[in-house]
Image (cartoon, grey):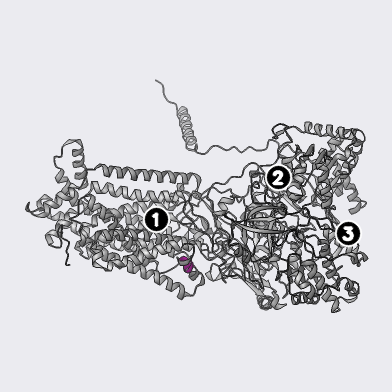
């Protein structure tokens, strides 16, 4: 890598130094943080074991609301997983140069979010010890999963998405890993030698030759092209878990685009939420600047408007269809027992993001941080509202009922956030959180260079 | 050099192989199946034996068949040949099993320790010796009459033994106490017709049924019998349906089946009946009978009674006209909850109305009278309590009765018990009286006992043990005989039977002479035992108006209290728990009250206006105070009660009676005076007014129904008679045109299968009694989950009876698992009871969404749930529009010996799996196997589900939809047929037949 670094006085060396310099050394703050996260994860593990031992009744889900916070979390985390691939693949294909500083973190977020989301279908199983019944494995009984069930589609969609995201992320990392390897050449001590060995294995013998670069570029492009439709398909399939059911409030053709937009919306919000403390903690203020928040703000606004449109369209269709069950479901969603979550959802997802129309706010990192938190909350509640209110108020009025999460569900939900952050923090200290290669490319191509806030863009 | 021989090698290989195999199997503890060493003659494993017996859960005396598997009774069903219940049984009757298998039963004789007051187990010999010794002393000291015996009012051999035994011992003090007695009716009949009997009301023959309050579909006299008659009268058939008018302050379960509710004042029944009779007489519609009735009813013009009855005169006149216009009619008396201080007069008034309308001898039949021992007057009870207080009762024996719980606190029975030296209870469970006893000599439960019963004239039924006694209990008959032997002398001389069974058998010699004169007794006895008893037709006894009726004073009854206590208090026997004796049965505690759908609790029903005045809602605790006591109970806001009346069910409020009853709800008897209907001496349940005050405390009153408004969705459908007749006519033509045509749902099975199982539920028959729910629990090993889990919506009922109020006020829905307000329109309350269960859809939404094929369609059209395959995603439940599926949230317990009741043909599900109605697939399998063995198809009627089997109203019919001539196919082609939420195209196998209303507009 050093060979393409150019003259020493160029910012290239600074880039490598800044980004690699953020790695490994962990201070007390970091360690305390990791300890807290591990404790929360441990507690959630205890809660899960308790639930397995005594039964699903330890969770608050009940008749008729058989899905609750677990599936809310599942959809929420799958949604979070969307921004990574979107920013990496789609923006890459669209040649949006500003993506370079955030794509790596966004991709990592994708991987960890899918790892988190993937736990929830297991956690929510009544008999998790038979989870393998869901997989198509050959067996004496000649029993196969039911390919008509959206849950099986989910199984394939999520595992495909995870595989592709992982490969995409990893291939993007290869040149950077080689840079680190080169930096580590001759590192002292056992730990140093171990790191050097590790990174040299991970960089797969990258030498930065022209052939390698040419093949790498091609491969990256194709992968981006393969990953792009997945952004649309995964959350479409997740949305079909609901849309394929006949439950009023779920059974709607708008669900696929609505969920995809929502997923991107929530994913962008999560990128903003994570990047703010992250740039500060790792001292990367020069790399992730107002310019990037400005652009992410625009994306947030766009997806917020799509989501807002979907909300309105849902109500319009419920009214226009003349289906009394559908209309009653939507009426009750807004003014019934779950009015609180509904208000949170609409306020956070539709009203607050409107602030992003103001360029001043988009370029105010603190403001964007706050807005993104609201969006995260709002999007979690969106899934809660869709799942819970629809189930609570179905066709048979005699069987209407309410749902309230139990401590087990809340513990596991908290645990899922800890689990996600734990991996993200581990990532921040072991792998280059910003693509060194791509930042250097941006500089070389003159698209953008560190510290540039592009005030008058 | 040692060589390994081939044989050794194989041995080692075999051993290690087996060892490895065993280690691999080591996860589950080995469970041993031990075959019988000596096969008992009657028991074939897997094949049930049925024993005929008699239900003793209430005084009605229905005949039962007890299904016994491997020596354990597992289900109680009605005896199809029995004249009282014709194969049907209510929820309470079926729950007799949980009396037998109750883990809180008294397992051995108990004696109270003098010091601590705790009970200690003693053996029978010692217990009897103690009693005999004391009796001997009493007799020798000439204080035989210091012995008192309290029993229930059942007639039969045991009753005679009590009388003879008391006579032999020398005490005249036998007191018969029934919580709810029919003495006002008996007395009224004596006064009106000179016949002190309880007649049979032939509801099935009546086109118009007018009830002045009797809960004849829930608790009154013989509910299963009346439910059958009611269904025969009210079910829409051949273009006609009967009409039922309920007159009373509260819409009870019985009232909820009315076509019209006339919300008269709490004590208005008598005046309305008189005024109706007067209209009949004045308009000359009473014929020759009018002359005799006229002087009695002359003063009671509708205008004059209107104010006191709190009902418009025009309504009374209209009712009278309807009553006279009907081709056949019957008026039913006020019943238990209407028993006020002048209840006999009210019963007389209803008698006069029936008489004036010419119903006596037609729909009111003397002859096949109900047989009950005459219950003690309240005055007699008071006298006994006084004697007890004065120390004049040395020994008190209590059998089949729990007077501490079922007499008003104001009577002071519980306190007076303290002055009795020896209180002996024969109860098999620790009821309130037993808990205060000095000696408990637990009787067998009815299912372990020999016995007999005489429910009505011409019906003598037998009880036989269906299982060896589970615990160290002894039949009270045997105890009495053994005591007599111990007393020796002349007492022993009067009883030379070794055991009660022999005594019973001997006493049936006489029955044999009556019912089968000239036949061999042994043959008769065996025949009677296997049939469950003997019965014969009884002719109608003709009666005329007695001169005594002129002496009846129709004074308006008084209620205790004044302006500070503005609400009349109605206390009524719970349709589910009766007087509280069934409160220890978990099935019944978890069975939603048919009206309020509340489980595991007590409540006070009040009109929304009252609630508004108090500023409270459902679930808010109210302090209720009468001049005689006070208690706190959560409110249930209900449109089905007058604003000047409040109602509390009787049955809860036990301090004892086992884990399920203890500390649950309140006993409203704490509020009542020890008042009596003056003429008959019966307990006056309607005798006081109360004041209400909000306490500011709120509790969760657990209701199992979300909303009582079906929002006009295709759920509970009602049509008018005219519309139904037209539709039926059309359907009949259609059937004539294509008699062999099948309904659409019949297609949804394997083309080669001869069966597509289906069900038809006639909502015009269903009375909402919920017997089907308990049948389902018993048949399908459905766990009881308790109040807390019910509050979370986790009750496991595969079949629920929903009640929908078709005229519903605003805002009456949608407060989840807390209670929803039952509501109705003031003018025409119309309740539809709807049994909801898995519809076994041909196009089932649950099936495609299951990722593991745990639910699928079988070749006979059943929607099958494979417990072993289920992983518990619960998606199926989310996609079920009927919400018929239940999830095993936990592993539920069946504490010993309740586990003995489990049906071995049905899996006990583990936590984490989904379950639902299977259409009793185990019964279908059995019928199909039987049919296959004979090389034929299953015949119509050969297999039925547990719910259909027990339904007292015969509202549920099960069968094969591929057979065009089956009952279910015919019903499915009825003009009233519809599918619940049919527009979802789920193609259900369950066809509902629309309820038929004859509301006031059609009258």
- Determine the residue positioned at 67% across, 42% down: B104
- Determine the residue positioned at 24% across, 43% down: A26
Q: Residues within 10 Å of mark 1 (few under 14, many from 20)?
A: many
Residue B814: where, in percent of width, then height?
Answer: 54, 64
Q: Report the magenta residues as a range.
A: A329-333
Marks 1 and 2 in Cβ contact (< 8 Å):
no
Q: Which residue sits furthest top?
A: B1
Q: Which residue is mark 3?
A: B196
Examine the image and state in which quarter residue B894 appears.
Answer: top right
Q: Secondary structure at mark 3?
A: loop
Q: Secondary structure at mark 1?
A: helix
Q: What's the magenta bit mostly, secondary-structure-wise? A: helix
- Determine the residue positioned at 89% across, 54% down: B515
For the C terminus of chain B, give its image quadrant. bottom right
Residue A421: where, in percent of width, then height?
Answer: 31, 50
Q: CA distance from mark 1 to mark 3?
A: 73 Å
Q: Is residue A146 visible?
A: yes
Q: Which residue is mark 2?
A: B100
For the N terminus of chain B, give its image quadrant. top left
Question: Which chain letter goes with mark 1?
Answer: A
* Dot placed on the residue nearer the N-terminal end, 2 or 3: 2
Question: Would you say B402 lies left or right of A34 here?
Answer: right
Are marks 2 and 3 in one subunit? yes
Instruction: Say which of marks 1 and 3 sits in front.
Output: 3
Is A348 magenta? The answer is no
Instruction: Say which of marks 2 and 3 sits in front.
Output: 3
In the rendered structure, find residue A74 and report the number of the disc placed on it. Answer: 1
Are marks 1 and 3 in one subunit? no
**Nearest the camera: A378 or B769?**
A378
Question: Which chain letter goes with mark 2?
Answer: B
Work out whether B440 lies above or below A60. Answer: above
């Amino acid at each position: 890598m050093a060979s393409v670094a150019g003259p020493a006085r160029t910012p290239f060396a600074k880039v490598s130094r800044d980004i690699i310099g953020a790695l490994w050394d962990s201070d007390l703050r970091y360690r305390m943080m990791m300890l807290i996260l591990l404790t929360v994860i441990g507690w959630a593990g205890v809660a899960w074991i308790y639930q397995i031992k005594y039964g699903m009744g330890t969770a608050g889900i009940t008749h008729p609301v058989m899905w609750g916070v677990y599936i809310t979390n599942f959809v929420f985390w799958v949604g979070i997983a969307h921004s990574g691939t979107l920013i990496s693949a789609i923006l890459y294909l669209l040649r949006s140069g500003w993506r370079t500083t955030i794509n790596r973190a966004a991709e990592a977020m994708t991987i960890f979010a899918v790892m988190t989301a993937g736990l929830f279908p297991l956690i929510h199983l009544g008999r998790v010890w038979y989870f393998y019944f869901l997989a198509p494995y050959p067996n004496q009984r000649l029993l196969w999963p039911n390919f008509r069930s959206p849950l099986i589609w989910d199984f394939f969609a999520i595992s495909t998405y995870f595989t592709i995201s992982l490969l995409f992320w990893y291939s993007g990392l290869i040149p950077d890993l080689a840079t680190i390897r080169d930096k580590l050449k001759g590192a002292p001590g056992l730990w140093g030698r171990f790191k050097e060995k590790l990174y040299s294995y991970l960089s797969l013998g990258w030498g930065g030759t022209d052939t390698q670069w040419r093949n790498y570029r091609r491969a990256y492009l194709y992968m981006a092209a393969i990953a792009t439709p997945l952004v649309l398909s995964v959350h479409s399939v997740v949305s079909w878990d609901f849309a394929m059911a006949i439950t009023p409030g779920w059974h709607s053709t708008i669900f696929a685009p609505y969920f995809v937009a929502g997923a991107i919306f929530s994913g962008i919000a999560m990128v903003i939420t994570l990047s703010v403390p992250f740039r500060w903690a790792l001292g990367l203020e020069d790399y992730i600047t107002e310019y990037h928040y400005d652009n992410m703000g625009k994306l947030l606004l766009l997806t917020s408007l799509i989501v807002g449109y979907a909300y309105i369209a849902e109500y319009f269709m419920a009214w226009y269809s003349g289906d009394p069950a559908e209309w009653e479901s939507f009426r009750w969603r807004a003014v019934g027992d779950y009015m609180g979550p509904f208000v949170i959802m609409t306020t956070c997802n539709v009203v607050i993001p409107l602030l992003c129309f103001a360029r001043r706010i988009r370029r105010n990192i603190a403001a964007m941080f706050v807005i993104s938190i609201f969006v995260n909350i709002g999007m979690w509640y969106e899934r809660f509202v869709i799942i819970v209110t629809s189930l609570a108020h179905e066709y048979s009025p005699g069987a209407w009922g309410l749902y309230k999460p139990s401590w087990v569900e809340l513990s596991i939900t908290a645990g899922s956030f800890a689990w996600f952050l734990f991996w993200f923090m581990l990532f921040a200290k072991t792998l280059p959180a910003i693509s060194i290669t791509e930042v250097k490319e941006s500089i070389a191509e003159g698209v953008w260079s560190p510290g540039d806030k592009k005030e008058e863009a | 050099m040692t060589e390994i021989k081939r044989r050794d090698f194989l041995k080692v290989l075999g051993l290690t192989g087996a060892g490895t195999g065993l280690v691999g199997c080591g996860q589950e503890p080995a469970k041993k199946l031990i075959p019988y060493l000596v096969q008992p003659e009657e028991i074939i494993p897997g094949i049930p034996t049925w024993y005929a017996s008699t239900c003793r859960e209430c005084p009605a005396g229905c005949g039962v068949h007890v299904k016994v598997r491997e020596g354990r009774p597992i289900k109680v069903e009605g005896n199809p040949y029995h004249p009282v219940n014709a194969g049907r049984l209510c929820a309470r009757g079926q729950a007799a099993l949980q009396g037998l298998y109750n883990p809180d039963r008294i397992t051995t004789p108990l004696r109270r320790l003098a010091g601590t007051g705790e009970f200690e187990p003693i053996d029978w010999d010692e217990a009897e010796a103690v009693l005999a010794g004391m009796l001997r002393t009493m007799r020798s000291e000439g204080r035989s009459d210091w012995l008192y015996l309290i029993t229930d009012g059942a007639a039969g051999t045991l009753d005679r033994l009590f009388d003879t035994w008391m006579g032999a011992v020398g005490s005249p003090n036998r007191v018969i106490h029934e919580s709810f007695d029919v003495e006002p009716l008996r007395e009224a009949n004596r006064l009106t017709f000179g016949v002190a009997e309880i007649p049979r009301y032939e509801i099935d023959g009546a086109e118009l049924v007018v009830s002045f309050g009797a809960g004849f579909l829930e608790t009154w006299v013989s509910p299963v019998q009346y439910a059958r008659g009611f269904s025969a009268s009210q079910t829409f058939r051949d273009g006609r349906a009967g009409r039922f008018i309920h007159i009373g302050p509260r819409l009870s379960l019985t009232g909820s089946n009315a076509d019209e509710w006339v919300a008269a004042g709490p004590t208005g029944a008598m005046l309305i009946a008189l005024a109706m009779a007067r209209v009949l007489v004045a308009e000359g519609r009473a014929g020759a009978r009018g002359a005799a009735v006229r002087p009695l009813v002359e003063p009671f013009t509708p205008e004059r009674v209107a104010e006191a009855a709190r009902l418009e005169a025009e309504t009374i006149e209209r009712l009278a006209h309807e009553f006279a216009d009907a081709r056949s009619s019957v008026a039913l008396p006020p019943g238990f909850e209407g028993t006020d201080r002048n209840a006999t007069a009210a019963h007389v008034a209803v008698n006069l109305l029936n008489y004036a309308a010419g119903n006596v001898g037609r729909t009111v039949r003397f002859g096949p009278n109900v047989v009950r021992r005459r219950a003690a007057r309240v005055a007699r009870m008071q006298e006994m309590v006084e004697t007890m207080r004065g120390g004049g009762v040395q020994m008190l024996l209590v059998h089949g009765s729990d007077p501490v719980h079922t007499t008003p606190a104001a009577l002071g029975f519980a306190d007076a018990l303290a002055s009795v030296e020896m209180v002996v209870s024969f109860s098999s469970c620790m009821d309130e009286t037993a808990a205060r006893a000095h000696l408990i000599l637990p009787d067998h439960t009815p299912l372990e006992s020999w016995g007999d019963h005489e429910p009505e004239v011409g019906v003598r039924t037998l009880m036989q043990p269906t299982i060896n006694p589970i615990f160290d209990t002894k039949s009270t008959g045997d105890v009495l005989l053994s005591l007599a032997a111990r007393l020796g002398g002349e007492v022993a001389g009067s009883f030379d039977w070794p055991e009660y069974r022999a005594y019973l058998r001997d006493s049936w010699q006489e029955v044999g002479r009556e019912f089968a004169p000239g036949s061999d007794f042994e043959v008769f006895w065996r025949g009677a035992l296997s049939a469950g008893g003997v019965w014969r037709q009884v002719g109608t006894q003709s009666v005329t108006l007695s001169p005594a009726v002129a002496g009846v004073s129709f004074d308006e009854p008084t209620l205790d209290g004044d302006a500070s206590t503005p609400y009349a208090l109605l206390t009524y026997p719970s349709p589910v728990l009766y007087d509280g004796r069934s409160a220890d049965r978990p099935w019944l505690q978890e069975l939603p009250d048919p009206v309020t759908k509340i489980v595991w609790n007590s409540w006070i029903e009040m009109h929304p206006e009252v609630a508004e005045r108090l500023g409270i809602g459902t679930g808010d605790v109210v302090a209720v105070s009468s001049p005689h006591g006070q208690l706190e109970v959560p409110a249930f806001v209900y449109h089905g009660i007058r604003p000047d009346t409040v109602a509390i069910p009787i049955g809860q409020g036990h301090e004892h009676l086992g884990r399920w009853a203890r500390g649950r709800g309140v006993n409203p008897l704490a509020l009542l005076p020890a008042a009596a209907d003056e003429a008959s001496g019966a307990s006056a349940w309607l005798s006081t007014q109360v004041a209400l005050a909000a306490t500011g405390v709120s509790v969760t009153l657990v209701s199992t129904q979300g909303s009582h408004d079906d929002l006009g969705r295709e759920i509970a459908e009602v049509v008018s008679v005219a519309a139904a007749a037209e539709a039926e006519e059309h359907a009949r033509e259609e059937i004539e045109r294509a008699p062999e045509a099948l309904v659409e749902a019949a297609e949804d099975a394997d083309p080669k299968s001869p069966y597509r199982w289906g069900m038809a539920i006639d909502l015009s028959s269903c009375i909402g009694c919920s017997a089907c729910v308990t049948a389902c629990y018993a048949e399908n090993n459905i766990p009881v989950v308790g109040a807390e889990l019910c509050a979370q919506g986790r009750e496991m009922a595969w079949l629920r009876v929903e009640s929908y109020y078709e005229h519903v006020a605003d805002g009456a829905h949608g407060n989840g698992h807390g209670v929803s307000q039952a509501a109705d329109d003031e003018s025409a309350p119309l309740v539809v009871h709807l049994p909801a269960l898995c519809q076994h859809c041909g196009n089932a939404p649950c099936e495609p969404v299951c990722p593991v094929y745990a639910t699928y369609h079988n070749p006979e059209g059943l929607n099958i749930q494979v417990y072993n395959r289920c992983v518990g995603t619960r998606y199926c439940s989310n996609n079920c529009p009927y919400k018929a599926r239940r999830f095993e949230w936990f592993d539920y317990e069946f504490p010993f010996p309740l586990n003995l009741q489990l049906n071995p043909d049905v899996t006990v599900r583990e936590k984490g799996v989904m379950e639902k109605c299977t259409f009793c697939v185990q019964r279908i399998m059995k019928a199909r196997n039987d049919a296959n063995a004979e090389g034929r198809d299953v015949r119509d009627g050969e297999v039925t589900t547990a719910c259909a089997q027990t339904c007292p109203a015969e509202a549920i019919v099960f069968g094969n939809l591929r057979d065009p001539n089956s009952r279910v196919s015919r019903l499915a082609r009825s003009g009233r047929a519809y599918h619940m939420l049919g527009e979802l195209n789920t193609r259900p196998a369950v066809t509902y037949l629309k309820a038929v209303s004859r509301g006031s507009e059609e009258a």
